[in-house]
Amino acid sequence: MDCSLSVHMGQRVLLVGANGSCKTTVMSIFGGKRMVPAGNADVLGRDCFNDCNHAEVTFCGDWWHAEYFMNLTVGEVLGKLRDEPRTKHLVRVLQVNLEWKINHCSDGMRRRCQLLELLAVARPVYLLDEITSDLDIYSREGILSFLKAESEIA
């Protein structure tokens, strides 16, 4: 089946459908997380899965639910990015403590940490799959306001 979608800079797009209608699959394909044959899916003119240097797109799914071998702090995960103004702003928006140990965080805290890590570097395309599902009302409002403002600046 052939399908195409054109989205212009600054647009926010919602992908909606019933459970099991392949929303996550579509986003994971465009995010380069699911293999498709070369030439079958591209974003910004580059192959989603087969172009290993495609850093303009980030996909946020729910991969942070697992326990990790090394129990790092959020600050250690961020590394040099922790001191960037964008990161500091997101820390305030998402109400994240950089000293939190990832393995000791609740699902909501982990989601906020995951969003912080993925949004710390500005990119032209964010594919965000149910990002507010584990967030409290204040974090939801903060992250949605941040994303709205970011798309309107572009």
Image (tube, helix red, strand yellow):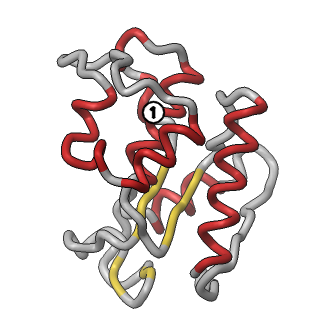
Q: Amino acid at mark 1?
A: Cys
Q: Nearer the viewer, residue 55 or 94?
A: 94
Q: Give the x, y percent position of residue 17.
A: 80, 55
Label 1 environment density (alpha carbons within 10 Å; few <14, some 14–19, many ≥20) = many
Q: Give the x, y percent position of residue 45.
A: 39, 90
Against 57, residue 81 (above or below) is above
Against 151, residue 25 (above or below) is above
Q: Secondary structure at mark 1?
A: helix
Q: Give the x, y percent position of residue 90.
A: 50, 46
Location of the C terminus by quadrant is bottom right
Mark 1 sits on what residue? Answer: 113
Against 137, residue 39 (above or below) is below
Q: Residue at x 59, y 42 (%)?
A: 93
Q: Is residue 34 left or right of residue 95?
A: left
Which corner quadrant of the image does residue 36 belong to? Answer: bottom left
Q: Residue at x 50, y 36 (%)?
A: 62
Q: How many marks?
A: 1
Q: Is residue 79 left or right of residue 34?
A: left
Against 103, residue 41 (above or below) is below
Q: Nearer the viewer, residue 79 or 7?
A: 79
Q: Give the x, y percent position of residue 46.
A: 34, 84
Q: Residue at x 21, y 73 (%)?
A: 53
Location of the N terminus by quadrant is bottom right
Q: Residue at x 29, y 31 (%)?
A: 75
